[in-house]
Image (cartoon, rainbow, N blue to C red):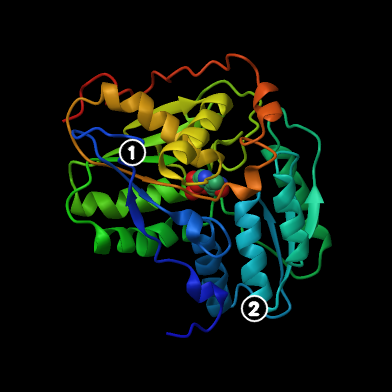
Amino acid sequence: MIHDSILHCIGPTPLVRLARLFPCPDHPVIAKLELLNPGGSIKDRPARLIVERALRSGAVSAGSHLVESSSGNFGIALAVAARVHGLRFTCVVDPNLAPANHLILERLGAHVEMVCQRDERGGYLGTRIRRVQELLETVPDAVWINQYANPGNWRAHYYLTAREILAELDGPVDFLVLGISTSGTILGLARRLRTVFPRLRVIAVDAAGSVIFGGEPGPRRIPGIGASAVPELFSPEEIDDVVVVSDREAAGGCRALLAAEGIFAGGSSGAVVAAIGKLIPRLPRAGRILTLLPDRGERYLDLVYDDDWVASLPEATPAVEPTERPLILAGTAQ
Ligand code: PMP
């Protein structure tokens, strides 16, 4: 089969058993390798779907200038889509951006705008969004993609990622454990997989210092996971539980995944690995765990795979489990 463009090479990505890392017969762990997407991450899917639907609806046309705030992966995915469709693109980023991602964005032809001021919550999201609004007022034909509010974000996973999972699985999934930032991935997959597996429990993995589940805002150094404002898309009643992981725990998870499985993955993959390690002894029943590994490790060589960087992290970032909805950890899940 010959594809029409690199965008047509997004998915299907394989499912892999993490049996060496989690040799637990009661809780087999399956990971979908989203890191194998051509742009390097899970965000290839919403970027393609959103841009192509906008081109079809007329919301974006040949003269449009795409604008987006991104911690890296979505920006890269949009930069690829912008190249393929001949669109201009400005990406607003913050200092958490992995240095390699900065270069990749520029090489892909994106105009990169770095904000350096933290917002009132201690993150950069507020500052990035303010910069986007300035650009919308000043750049001719600017169109804001807005991954935090765009329904195409969760729909990409509802229609594409979930369809692949359902086509390849050989039995039910009991626990879906996913990193969260915009909440597009977890909501899209939960909405589709729950229609097939009614007993499914959906567990978000959030970064310490993120405010998505009402935690105290604080500094976070791993891009891609957590947020410093609650995303407009987010719908907390669809999430059964949350596990909070510190940057240090996530770095440990990355290294454990690499050592046991030979999978070289990014920071949020390490976060889900660390979260699954914490969850397994506390799950109220046996069952299969499904997770995603969202991006590759190469872009994190200066972060989670750098010993000095890990040593620079605060010794004991408090990884407190929020008490809001501890359904599974309290053992009340059926
Ligand atoms: N992991 C990585 C590496 C990501 O880039 C993202 C997206 N920011 C996520 C996890 C979380 O996905 P979502 O935004 O769909 O919640």
Q: Which residue is mark 1?
A: 20
| Label ID, residue 49 | none
Q: Quadrant of residue 156?
A: bottom left
In the foreground, 104 or 320: 104
Residue lying at 25% horizontally and 39% vertically, measured from the top left = 28
**Is 256 displayed left or right of 81 in the figure?**
left
Q: Is residue 153 visible?
A: no
Residue 26 in the image: state x and y as whole percent.
Answer: 18, 33
Q: Which residue is mark 2?
A: 85
- Name the N-terminal-most of marks 2 and 1: 1
Residue 175 in the image: state x and y as whole percent.
Answer: 27, 39
Whether 61 is drawn above or below 287: the answer is below
In the foreground, 318 or 12: 12
Ligand 1 within 8 Å, label 1 CB = no
Residue 254 in the image: state x and y as whole percent.
Answer: 51, 36
Residue 8 in the image: state x and y as whole percent.
Answer: 49, 75
Per the image, label 1 sits on a secondary structure element best described as loop
